[in-house]
Amino acid sequence: MFLSEIEPIAALVKAPGIVPVLPQSPCETCSLRSLQFCAALLQGDGSPNFIHATYRTTAGRRNIYRAGEPSEGVLVICEGWAVRFVQLPNGKRQILSVVLPGELVSPTAILERQFSFSVQAVTDVRYTYLPFAEVRARMRNNHALFDLWLRLSAAEHRNADKRLVDLGQRAAQERIAALITHIMSRYEERGELPDDEFPFPLSQQQIADCTGLTPVHTCRVLSWLRKNGICDVRHGMVKITDRGELQRLAAIK
């Protein structure tokens, strides 16, 4: 369980004879502040590291943002996993991406205040809305932050192309292998992949929604991967037992 919701930091009150002390922002003490966007946002650029952010928590399987609603700011997941998805009129849904701790929900969140996708917590999640104006002001003055935003936008486009190929042209085993290796590579980039085992709290339904399969077909593929000694997906974890074969299945030929 996470700490109770942290309220937005109140403005400092000045009183005669009292020197106001700038309170520490949760961003400054966050264990993920060295990752990607947060690291670039908080690095020295002449502006204070203090961010007037709003922090909240929500339980797993609850929506954080619904498509079409006004966004309160630039959404960053601080703890837990979330997914970005589109809900169809017939009740089906397509998961567009998985969001790990320390990541922006989408690079476009910096530019737009309303989105065609929804965001749902996979696990219990702690998240923050960073004010649009503050983030954009820092992007104008911080070349490293702007360059990172461009790289994140390009990566999102590349990943969307890969998912389109997976959904349109690839077998079920290849789709799920691609999903697992994509998450694995992100853990490797963060230095968080000891012994080829890492958290993977997606349910079979969520894996199906990512890969365009039915839950029954997803269950068969996961069983096939386990029986063939490639990887084992159970109890919210992935254990890679044959990395070479998993990567061969995941590769776009």
Image (spheres, helix red, strand yellow):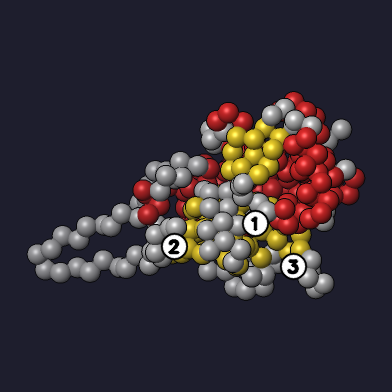
List the residue tagged with mark 1.
83
> Most extreme residue toward the left, as rendered?
17
The N terminus, quarter of image: bottom left
- Image spot of residue 53 (x, y percent): 43, 61
Q: Nearer the viewer, mark 2 or mark 1?
A: 1
The residue where tag 2 is placed is: 55
Gap between marks 3 and 2 measured at Cα: 26 Å
Q: Which residue is mark 3?
A: 87
First of labels 2, 1 by sequence position: 2
Q: Residue at x 69, y 38 (%)?
A: 232
The amino acid type, in three-letter code, at marker 2 is Tyr
Q: Residue at x 51, y 64 (%)?
A: 58
Q: Earlier in the sequence, mark 3 or mark 2?
A: 2
Against 91, is 250 above or below? above
Of the residues shown, which amino acid type is indicated by label 1?
A: Val
Which residue is nearer to you in this view: 152 or 228? 228
Residue 233, compared with residue 191, is above or below; it is: below
